[in-house]
Image: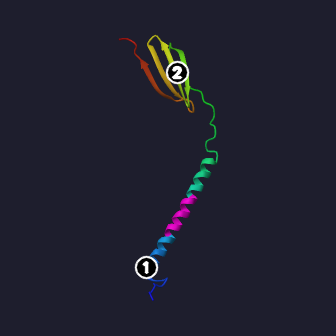
Amino acid sequence: MAQTAAPNAPGYRGLLALVIILGVLIVLGVIGLIAGAVYRLSGRNAISAPYATNIAAPGEQIEDTQLDGNRVLLRLSGPKGEEVVILDTATGRVLGRIAIDAKP
């Protein structure tokens, strides 16, 4: 008859410890996933207060506006030429200004 190792042999103790540690890590990972889902669904994305903003464009007129997601694109024209201004709709912050030089 073949001889089998006892359940408390040193080789089994290491494997048992490994299984216990991995089981604890799996439980902690599942708890982390649940906590992340609760955090995202808890209403942290509430609508902020309305804002007012001014864009410095002396002597310029708005020629065109376009809305793309959470960005507003303004095309301005004036005595200095044309300019494109990109705004963030959530904060009203100016993300960029592009001056258009149409002179050759």
Percent position of residue 50, x then y: 63, 31
On whether residue 77 falls in the magenta region, the answer is no
Which circle's residue, 1 or 2, is located before the other in the chain? 1
The residue at the point 50 percent across, 18 percent down is 75
The x, y position of residue 59, in whole percent, is 50, 12
Q: Is residue 99 left or right of residue 32?
A: left
Q: Nearer the viewer, residue 74 or 33?
A: 33
For the point 44% across and 12% down, which residue is it? 80
The C terminus appears in which quarter of the rendering? top left
Is the residue 4 above or below the residue 95 in the image?
Answer: below
**Residue sitting at x 51%, y 64%:** 25
Does residue 26 belong to the magenta stretch?
Answer: yes
The colour mode here is rainbow
Judge the density around disc 2: few (<14), some (14-19), many (≥20) Cα neighbours within 10 Å. some
Main SS category, magenta section? helix
Disc 2 marks which amino acid? Answer: Leu
Residue toward you, 27 or 3: 3
Identify the element where label 1 is drawn: helix
Against 103, residue 17 (above or below) is below
Q: Dividing the picture into quarters, in which one does residue 2 lie?
A: bottom left
For label 2, the residue is: 74
Question: Closer to the observer: label 1 or label 2?
Answer: 1
71 or 78: nearer the eye?
Answer: 71
* Cα separation between marks 1 and 2: 71 Å
Q: Residue furthest front?
A: 1
Magenta-tinted stretch:
21-31
Residue indicated by mark 1: 11
Quarter occupied by the N terminus: bottom left
Q: Which amino acid, mark 1?
A: Gly
